[in-house]
Image (tube, rainbow, N blue to C red):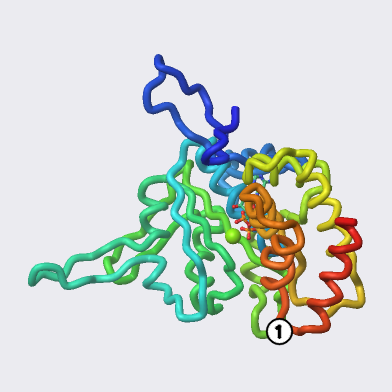
């Protein structure tokens, strides 16, 4: 059952199950949930590749809730240090106290650590992950002298958008080949329409037109765009439509302006949208 307000799928709610878990809504496109579960059960690390806004983060949130594991998400960037992941000594009330970082917390409690946009992290930072990604499954904390053994229920998940990849920003091959990897893409229009409807509350019949339009926009070859229309942007557009905003204005604000600044490119996209809306 999907909660219309939050777009979340509720499991086993009811007066006899107070505090029943709420699992974030995720509509699979294939067998990715079973793959995630198998990788989790076997204690392997998982890498998810795919364009921005295609559902990678939502998938991880959904699976963590389904497996009943706490999720520690780290948005990686090039200022991220190894200590940001593992932890550091902090001065607290006149004493120095060790404070775990998100990776260490996930290892200690047997949770899932999710490194979003892992290619943004510097290579010396990703090396911290190596002992956790082979069969030792350990996290050495040099500063405290601990060697943490990851429990069975600990899992390391990372994701990135290969579209952005350049020579400076790519994962070290020695890091990359330690992960089981899966490629995500935007779902086929029937499924994407269901996702847009569930997330925005706009009737599915209207969401189908949006999903079909997205497919055409994504197929444009001669338009110079760094990124294509994402499921996220389609949900924004549907949300504006649900609020009674004129379709052209909604499409311009949610599907054109967020993707480009060039007036000619914007005009080209708008013309295609006008043609699609008739
Ligand atoms: N398969 C899906 N099921 C449910 N919601 C989805 C799905 N794919 C995308 N979404 C929606 O699109 C939004 C963006 O997805 P997100 O997981 O944040 O993308 P990514 O992490 O790949 O950039 C989510 O907040 C959710 O509303
Ligand atoms: Mg994400």
Number of numbered callouts drawn: 1
Quarter of the figure that contains the N terminus: top right
Residue 262 in the image: above or below residue 211: below
Q: Which image quarter holds the C terminus?
A: bottom right
> Residue 154 in the image: x percent, y percent?
47, 47
Is residue 159 visible in the rendered image? The answer is yes
Instruction: Measuring from the top left, give residue 228's x and y in whole percent.
Output: 77, 67
Quarter residue 277 falls in: bottom right
Residues 139 and 102: in front is 102
Give above or below for 267 relative to 140.
below
Name the residue: 52% across, 36% down.
Answer: 23
Q: Position of residue 74 (x, y in %)?
A: 47, 63
Left/right placement of residue 137 relative to residue 120 reads: left
Could you tell me residue 10's position as x and y percent? 53, 30
Kind of element beneath mark 1: loop
Is the CB of the residue bearing disc 1 within 8 angstroms of ligand 1?
A: no
Residue under the image location 87 percent in, 70 percent down: 271
Q: Quadrant of residue 276?
A: bottom right
**Residue depicted at x 59% and y 54%:** 57
277 sits left or right of 102 in the view: right
Res 180 visible = no
Q: Nearer the viewer, residue 112 or 190?
A: 190
Observer-nearest residue: 89 or 223? 223
Q: Residue at x 42, y 59 (%)?
A: 103
Badge 1 density bin: few <14, some 14–19, many ≥20, Cα 10 Å: few
As drawn, which residue projects farthest toward the top?
16
Q: Which residue was labeled with disc 1?
A: 167
Q: Is residue 223 left or right of residue 69?
A: right
């Amino acid at each position: 059952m999907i909660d219309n307000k939050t777009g979340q799928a509720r499991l086993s709610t009811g007066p006899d199950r107070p505090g029943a878990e709420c699992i974030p809504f995720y509509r699979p496109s294939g067998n990715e949930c079973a793959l995630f579960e198998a990788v989790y059960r076997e204690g392997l690390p998982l890498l998810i590749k795919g364009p921005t806004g295609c559902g990678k983060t939502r998938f991880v949130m959904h699976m963590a809730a389904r497996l009943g594991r706490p999720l520690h998400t780290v948005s990686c960037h090039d200022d991220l240090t190894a200590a940001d992941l593992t932890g550091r000594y902090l001065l607290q009330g006149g004493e120095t106290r060790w404070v775990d970082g998100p990776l260490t917390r996930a290892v200690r409690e047997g949770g899932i650590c999710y490194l979003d946009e892992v290619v943004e992290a510097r290579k010396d930072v990703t090396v911290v992950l190596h002992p956790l990604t082979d069969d030792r499954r350990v996290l050495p904390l040099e500063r405290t002298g601990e060697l943490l053994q990851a429990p069975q229920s600990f899992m390391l998940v990372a994701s990135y958008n290969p579209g952005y990849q350049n020579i400076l920003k790519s994962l070290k091959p020695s890091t990359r080949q330690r992960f089981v990897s899966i490629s995500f893409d935007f779902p086929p229009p029937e499924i994407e329409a269901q996702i847009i409807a569930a997330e925005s509350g706009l009737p599915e019949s209207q969401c189908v037109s949006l999903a079909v339009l997205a497919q055409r926009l994504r197929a444009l070859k001669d338009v110079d765009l760094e990124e294509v229309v994402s499921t996220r942007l389609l949900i924004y557009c549907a949300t504006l439509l649900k609020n009674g905003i004129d379709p052209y204005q909604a499409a311009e604000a949610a599907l054109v302006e967020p993707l480009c600044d060039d007036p000619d490119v914007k005009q080209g996209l708008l013309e295609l949208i006008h043609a699609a809306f008739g």
